[in-house]
Image (cartoon, rainbow, N blue to C red):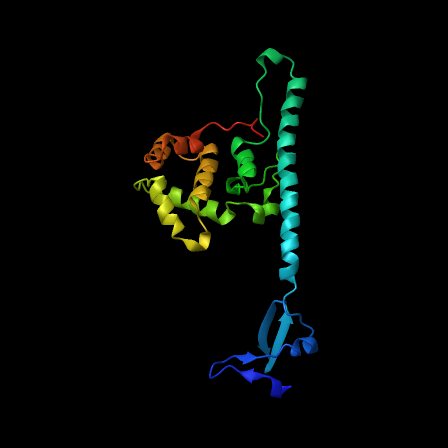
Amino acid sequence: MNSIIKKIGKSKGIVFPPQILDQIGLDLDDKIDIEIIDNYLVIKPIYPLRESEQDRNNLNEMFTMQRDSIFREERLYQLEQYILANNKEEFIYKNKYSDSYLYAWQERVYPFLHDIDDATIEFHHQFYTPCFYVSKEQVDFLIQYFDEVDLNDQRIPSLHHLEHQFIKIDKLGWTKMKLVKACRYLYLNGMFDDHFWGQLLIDCPPSEARSITKQFNRNER
């Protein structure tokens, strides 16, 4: 077998001819993992990479069904309250899920502020963490950033400034749309005061600012 394995010039690589794949049970499109164990070169196929794509598709389908279920559950909860109310003229709806939580599911923003144990409400999102467009890490990062600005009385940055600053943080994968959606989730959750949001949105076009601060319409779905 050594006679058919070639060195790559003076580098630390070697070339295996295609026929060797049959001997070690690999296909041409296999992804592999290579490591040295006890002076042996160990080559193994990475099967989870093939399966993970299907797993992700299945999880996304489950996410969609769960999201629709949450909105149905909220409507049924309010209908049940109305039916059971003694005085329907003075009836005031009470929500099972907050506007911010419903918005998070609707727009796929990880609802980081709802990572809590609440005996009265069953939160479903943690199982679907990989499915959210705005990730758990991004929302957590933004909360910590805003907290530091607010608690230390630092100058409140504009959204335009944040957009350029965050997009440079490549490892978190920020985009302007993700930043806007994450800000709206925090706004709907009641984080920070009107002055904070006013300064943050000071250089935004009115339509963009309103996309963050407008009232959440539960009947849009």
Tell me where residue 208 sits by quadrant. top left
Relative to 197, does residue 6 appear above or below in the rendering?
below
Q: Spot the residue most to the left.
A: 155
**Residue 132 vs residue 180: left or right?**
right
Name the residue at 62% across, 29% down: 74
What residue is at 35 percent from the left and 37 percent from the top? 200
Is there any visible trace of residue 203 in the rendered image?
A: yes
Picture quadrant of residue 4 = bottom right
If the image is split into quadrants, where does the N terminus sit?
Answer: bottom right
Q: From where the camera sits, is residue 38 visible?
A: no
Q: Quadrant of the C terminus?
A: top right
Q: Position of residue 199 (x, y in %)?
A: 33, 35
Q: Residue at x 64, y 60 (%)?
A: 50
**Furthest residue in direction bottom, as rendered:** 3
Q: Picture coordinates of residue 47 (x, y %)?
A: 66, 64
Residue 21 is drawn in which quadrant? bottom right
Between 140 and 16, the one lying in front of the other is 16
Q: Position of residue 30 (x, y in %)?
A: 63, 67
Vertical relation: 38 (above or below) 46: below
Which percent across, then down, holds residue 217? Answer: 52, 27
Q: Is residue 167 left or right of residue 93?
A: left
Q: Total marks drawn?
A: 0
Q: Looking at this view, is 41 or 124 the one in front? A: 41
**The one of 23 and 149 positioned closer to us in this rendering:** 23
Residue drawn at (51%, 34%) of the image:
100
